[in-house]
Image (cartoon, rainbow, N blue to C red):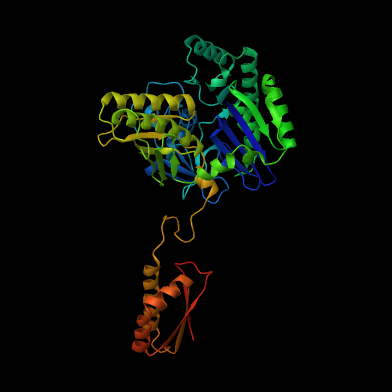
Amino acid sequence: MKKIIISTHPWQTRAAIMMDGKIQNIYFASHAIETLERVYIKGIVTKVLPGIQTAFVDIGQDRAGFLHISEIDRELALKKIGKNTEEISDAKLSTSSENKKREPKRHQSPDIAKIFKEGEAILVQVSKEPIYQKGAKLTTCFTLPGRFIVLMPNIPRIGVSKKVGDREERSRLKELVLKHLPEGMGAIIRTTSEGQQEKEIIRDIKYLVKTWNAIIKKFNQAEPKEQVHEDLPLALQVIRDHLDNDVDEIIIDNQDTQKKVYQFIKGIAPEHALKVKLHTAPPPLFEHLGIEKQIEDGLYKKVELKSGGSLIIETTEAMTVIDVNTGKFIGKKSMADTILKTNLEAAHEIVRQLRFRNIGGLIVIDFIDMLSQSHRQQLIRFFEKTLKERDKFQSVVLKVSEFGLVQMTRKRSGKTLTQQLTHNCPACKGSGFVKSIKTECYTVLRAIKKELLENKKLRDKLEIKINSAQLEHITNIEFNSILQLEKEFKSEITLSGLDSLAINRYKIKKK
């Protein structure tokens, strides 16, 4: 049973996609912090670096966004460079969502310096939010998502969702969209378009084309670094992207939001309007459905499997590593069958966790070793099939490596669950561990000696404030070291405990 759950408060809106009581996707929108993803901005080119084929664009944020040449649409580049002066290679310029193929006159590396000049204004769309120390990732391969199609206003190419399996239906949808799209535009046909009437899809196309024309008009009138267009509010975004025939209920805990969602659905899919329900009774909606607990569990690296096995999920800036363990599961058949069953269960749960935690980029999975080649193939086929059926983001899965690892990539989109809900620990600074009390005490003793060495003329008194646990360790274990320092430097050292000080902090005061 699939449900869309939306909780709105004055400070935040949260939306969860539930399947059989488990979170498949979770979204957050703070009412005080703007979301950049999918936003259109009139940016100003600040730097063009041909060496890395990247232009840096000021979009009014703390860090400039970066626009790589692979994210520049072909028509814009040809227009900038000049059609008669240089033919740009398809392979170098275009992304996977590139427009119609052309036969290049000659293969050569494109030069981004011939496309953009510093100081010029360009229309860009944010494809990825700023992450870690990187600015926002920008693109000119624009997309406008609708209910049935994603409009590509400057890429004349038609794509169909892989989940639309029927060949005749795929052909019908392609012909329909191609017939009603303005010249020079393209689209990706979404899964929700399958079986839809022609008038519904045409209405979606007209709405998106009208929106694109408004964007161009506003860009011409906008000030530098001004936002030209932003997506729908989160509650309506989730309805647009996830509402389909599989949805049984749409439960909302805010009456104003419920009315807006109801009116929105009535306009785009009236047959689903009666699925909208209001929840006002205690306990709060997310707590009532067990969502709060699942969000909390999603911040921890260990995930328990029903069979007794477990996953360990650890993310670094470079990649995410997932380890599969059998745990307490011993099975009832042979060891090989037990391992296969655990791996298949783990593969199913990994797909959910990738969506739930919004993990993208390079992912390495260490499944439990399997000697049988047929079992390995069965696992990979099942994993790829589950990704295709349950995950809308593009992913590529390689075969099991010589070390028994499965490598894959998944498209990044925004911040991970951990990045959205946490920040680095002030004690460990994100390393995940802190030094022992003994080690920190040795650090304090070295700091005292350094202070005495550097201030030979001011050896009267030193007052040291440290954490209470450190004070207890020094007075019980290392008190003789303090006495030796006092004797060696003819100084008086006073130690005092302070619970408010972190274990790796101390204060030295000279008197």
Residue 151: percent from left, percent from top: 56, 25
Is residue 213 shown above or below 200?
A: below
Residue found at the very far front of the displayed protein: 332
Residue in the foreground of this view, choosing between 213 and 482: 482
20 or 211: nearer the viewer = 20
Residue displayed at 50% across by 17% down: 164
Judge whether residue 184 can be spotted in this image: no
The structure residue drawn at horizontal position 41% and vertical position 21%, both measured from the top left corner, is 102
Q: Position of residue 119 (x, y in %)?
A: 53, 45
- Is any atom of residue 148 visible in this view? yes
The quadrant of the rendering that contains the N terminus is top right
Q: Is residue 159 above or below residue 320?
A: above
Where residue 337 appears, as percent x and y from the top left, is 32, 28
Residue shown at 51% from the left, 47% from the top: 419
Q: How many marks?
A: 0
Quarter holding residue 3? top right
Left or right: residue 309 compared with residue 33: left
The residue closer to the viewer here, 23 or 80, is 23
Name the one closer to the observer, 329 or 202: 329
Query: Looking at the picture, does residue 187 appear above or below residue 16?
Result: above
- Relative to 320, 130 lies left or right: right
Q: Position of residue 475 (x, y in %)?
A: 41, 78
Q: Is residue 349 above or below residue 439?
A: above
